[in-house]
Image (cartoon, rainbow, N blue to C red):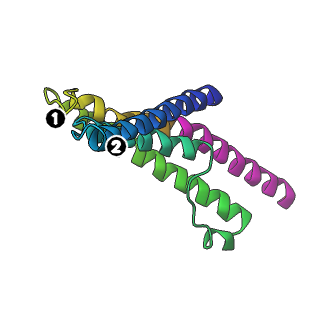
């Protein structure tokens, strides 16, 4: 299931990048060739970049390619590293549910009736990227968290057997 979700995100992000490049080219063409810059391109690129970020963060996280500073964690024992990973995943899960999903839904609902200036699109569409990113973060975090908890429990059982 994760591979299918990754593939969908990859296609959407690639399409966004292609559209952003096209809009940027159109902006330059209309400004310097037609002497009248297109008014919609700047807004489109801004919101496309927001969506690209909102999809890119969970995508990178799901592929374990996010930024991590591990100089302190590298000093932990193997068990300490696993417990730290569980703690980190729990924090990410809480953040994803509370800020991204709950906060994102509230912001999206609050934008009802508003439209963007140049594109005249509902602002709810733009803000919808926040709760979607939250759902994707939960989608990637829960299985990872369950696997880490399972590994910690297995290590505890092995330690108990060796002690007995």
Observer-nearest of 28 and 57? 28
Element type at mark 1: loop
Real-space CA distance between mark 1 and mark 2, rounded to the nearest whole angstrom: 20 Å
Q: Position of residue 88 (x, y in %)?
A: 53, 55
- Give the main secondary structure, helix, strand or loop, of the magenta stretch: helix
Q: Nearer the viewer, mark 1 or mark 2?
A: 2
Pinpoint residue 34: horizontal percent, then vertical percent. 26, 37
Left or right: where does residue 116 sit relative to residue 80? left
* Residue toward you, 68 or 23: 23
Would you say residue 127 is visible in this rendering? no
Residue 39 placement: quadrant: top left
Residue 127 in the image: state x and y as whole percent. 28, 36
Residue placed at 24% from the left, 30% from the top? 124
Instruction: Please identify the quadrant where the C terminus is shown.
Output: bottom right
85 lies above or below 17 = below
Residue at point 46% right, 38% down? Answer: 55
Question: Does 30 lie within the magenta span?
Answer: no
Q: Quadrant of residue 62?
A: top right
Would residue 57 appear left or right of 50 to someone viewing this image? Answer: right
| Residue 74 position (above or below residue 25) | below
- Badge 2 marks a residue whose secondary structure is helix
Task: Answer with left or right where residue 55 lies relative to residue 115.
Answer: right
- The foreground one among 104 and 155 is 104
Tell me if label 1 and label 2 are in contact, CB under 8 Å.
no
Residue identifier under label 1:
117
Look at 53% across and 32% down and name the residue there: 9
Residue 119 horizontal side relative to residue 2, left or right? left
Instruction: Please tell me which residue is depicted at 27% across the width and 42% down the height of the picture.
Output: 31
Other residues around mark 2 within 10 Å, as few (<14) / some (14–19) / many (≥20) = some
Which image quarter is the N terminus in? top right
Instruction: Report the residue marked by disc 2.
Output: 28
**Magenta-colored span:** 139-163
């Amino acid at each position: 299931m994760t591979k299918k979700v990754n593939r969908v995100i990859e296609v959407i992000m690639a399409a966004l990048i292609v559209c952003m490049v096209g809009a940027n080219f159109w902006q330059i063409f209309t400004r310097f060739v037609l002497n009248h810059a297109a008014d919609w391109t700047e807004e489109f690129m801004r919101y496309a970049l927001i969506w690209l970020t909102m999809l890119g963060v969970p995508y990178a996280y799901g592929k374990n390619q996010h930024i991590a500073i591990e100089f302190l964690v590298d000093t932990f024992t193997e068990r300490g590293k696993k417990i730290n990973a569980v703690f980190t995943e729990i924090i990410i899960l809480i953040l994803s549910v509370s800020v991204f999903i709950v906060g994102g839904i509230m912001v999206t609902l609050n934008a009802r009736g508003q439209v963007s200036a140049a594109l005249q699109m509902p602002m709810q569409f733009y803000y919808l990227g926040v709760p979607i990113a939250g759902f994707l973060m939960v989608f990637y975090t829960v299985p990872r968290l369950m696997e880490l908890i399972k590994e910690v429990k297995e290590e505890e059982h092995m330690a108990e057997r060796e002690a007995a």
